[in-house]
Amino acid sequence: MSTESSASSVNGAQAHVNLQNNSNKGYQIDILNPYFMHPNENPGNILATPLLSGPNYHSWSRAMIVALRSKHKLHFINGALPRPADDDRDSIAWDRCNTMIISWISNSVEPEISQSILWMDIAAEIWKELKDRFYQGDIFHISDPQEEIYTLKQGDCTVSTYYTKMKKLWQKLDNFSPIPHTSCNDDCK
């Protein structure tokens, strides 16, 4: 084998290794890649306070959604980014992000709730479990903010303070009221 062909093979092999390294690390430099993790991210982070206790589910889930959207990780909890096949290089990055999100969720809930999701392995399944358990649109929970709206008086409050209180109650009511489902098609308009 000549020195020239040997050097050519080494250069070709080196180029192949560099190409593999670049494709594996693309998610580490592309901040818009859903697998990107900032070096400051760690599993001990708490993304939402106060911690989920049950009755505060709506405000907690909103805070978590905002935090996860800012980190470009919302696709992991809404199921829009399923786990790639094991032979796909992205599966390792997906697992890393998924377990990081599981840690963030676990750290952002009360210890009793954390224990109930401890053995779940998929962030989207944990998210759905918490929603199924704590999202409440029943008549009893809806009646509380309705009564507060009905009895709220401006009194000595400024218009701005009164408006803020009223807006908060309306938002609370909107969160508790499920959107009605219809089987109507375009002819129902």
Image (cartoon, rainbow, N blue to C red):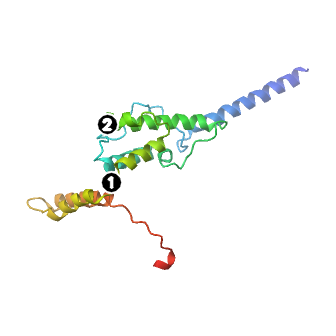
Tell whether label 1 touches label 2 (CB within 8 Å): no
For residue 84, above or below residue 7: below
Tell me where residue 119 appears, x and y as whole percent. Answer: 45, 33
- The residue at the point 16 percent across, 62 percent down is 159
Residue that appears at 65% across and 36% down: 23
| Local SS, label 1 | loop
Mark 2 lies on a secondary structure that is loop
Instruction: Return the residue nearer the eye: 154 or 114.
Output: 114
The label on residue 136 is 1
Q: Earlier in the sequence, mark 2 or mark 1?
A: 2
Quarter of image, res 108? top left
Would you place residue 12 above or below residue 64 in this image?
A: above
Task: Name the residue beneath numbered marker 2.
Answer: 110
Q: 188 left or right of 157? A: right
The alpha-carbon separation of the residues under discs 2 and 1 comes to: 18 Å
- Give x and y (percent) for residue 101: 45, 38
* Mark 1 Cα-neighbour bin, 10 Å: few <14, some 14–19, many ≥20: some
- 105 vs 81: above or below: above
Residue 127 on image: x %, y %: 43, 45
Q: Quadrant of the N terminus?
A: top right
Q: Position of residue 75 (x, y in %)?
A: 50, 47
Toward the viewer: 183 or 23? 183
Residue type at numbered disc 2: Glu
Front one among 20 and 52: 52
Other residues around mark 2 within 10 Å, as few (<14) / some (14–19) / many (≥20): some
| Amino acid, disc 1 | Gln
The residue depicted at 26 percent of the width and 61 percent of the height is 170
Front position among marks 2 and 1: 1
Residue 28 visible in the shown view = no
